[in-house]
Image: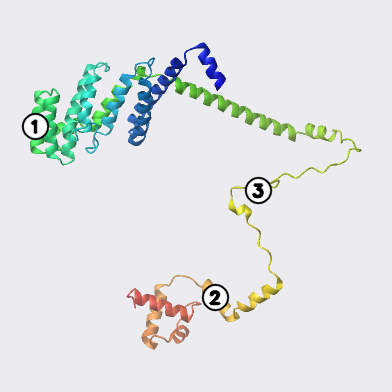
Amino acid sequence: MEQSHEMISSTTDLHTVEGIVQSWMVDYYFTQLCRLFRDRSAEKFHKTLKIFQAIVDEFETCSDSLNHSSQRTICCFLARVMDGEKLDVHYDRDARITPLMSSLPVWDVLEDVVCDPTLHDSVRTLLIVQCVAVCIKKGNSQMAKDTLQWLEKETAIPEKLHGKLTTIVNKKDAYDQLLIIFTYNKLLEKVDTFLDTQQDLSSDFLVEAASKVVQARQKRSDKASCEEDNGKKTSSSPESKKSKENEDPGDPEVVNIRPKKKLLSKQIELWKPDSIKKEPRPLRRSTVCRVSRRSSIPPVAESNISATNRSRRKWTSEEDKMLKSGVRRHGEGKWAVILNEFDFKNRTSVMIKDRWRTLKKLHLA
């Protein structure tokens, strides 16, 4: 790195080189901001905008910097339009000024940048309408009146448009035909059209250079994978096997030295905790006998457990009817008598008692 800096300082001016690099970075982030605005990615847009502002602020201190004022003004305008429907966001010291209200003077500054005058006028009209429409849709009629008064003082509104907005504000009509035509989404689409005409303001040098690097890496990886496949094919061929058999076995007088063992010679998966667990040791005979004595289960209980496991099935309506009739005849608690009287198909008295409890809980008994 030091050698490269020495080469740059010896051949060209270092400040000029840094200015060109920063200019490329400004172009790159400006392109990213335009793309994020089209995608309506507000969170990523504002994160990228902070980086863009930091680079531009540092870039303007450089005496040999290029003029990126248009890009900065466009990004300021895009940020205000992106937050146009948020009345609690402020870009001005006066808290009464909404983002769309503050975007109007910025858009007037960009009049020379917009190639189509008709596009500039249509975006300006949409901004004026949406300044009032956002307040009405949010249910803040007083703020809509204050916004209309501010527009009368600060901007030139056509008479017809001013009359319609006054009627909308007085009626508090959020579904007026004017607001249905000049929507916020329409404003975003017109701004997208404006951004399509501003491709000449930025350079795609960094993107093109990075794409070439990615393509070169991809070619290297493809070449390496092809060489590996060819190596496997040649090693498995019969000719390679013959060459291995014909190799010199080595000097018999040379002492056969045992190679040193490498650390972690076994293939152990280091990042999985299961790989360091020890295998369970087999129990001794005495412990097996001791455990079996303590936890011995009578054969009758074992047969009952196996029977219950085998006979786990849903109760049918016929079985419920037999159970109800048995309780009517013999009463609750006579489960063995009821079991012998009816055919419950391998069910036990305990199962009959549990089913009766379930029916009582469900108010079906």
Viewer-side residue, 171 vs 90: 90
- Single out the mark in the foreground, 1 or 3: 3
Say few, some or many: other residues with alpha carbon within 10 Å of mark 3 (under 14 / 14 to 19 / 20 or more). few
Q: Label for residue 268? A: 3
Secondary-structure class at tag 2? helix
In the displayed structure image, the side of residue 152 where residue 342 appears, left or right: right
Instruction: Look at label 1 and name its amino acid.
Output: Thr
Label 3 vs label 2: CA separation?
43 Å
- Single out the mark in the foreground, 1 or 2: 1
Residue drawn at x 68%, y 76% as measured from the top left: 289
In primary-sequence order, the first of circles 1 and 3 is 1
Residue drawn at x 47%, y 13% as measured from the top left: 13
Instruction: Look at label 2 and name its amino acid.
Output: Ile
**Residue under pointer 1:** 166
Residue drawn at x 44%, y 79% as measured from the top left: 352
Q: Label for residue 305? A: 2
Percent across and percent down for residue 153 are 11, 26
Q: Quadrant of the C terminus?
A: bottom left
In primary-sequence order, the first of circles 1 and 2 is 1
Label 1 vs label 3: CA separation?
77 Å
Percent across and percent down for residue 268 are 65, 48
Q: Label for residue 328? A: none
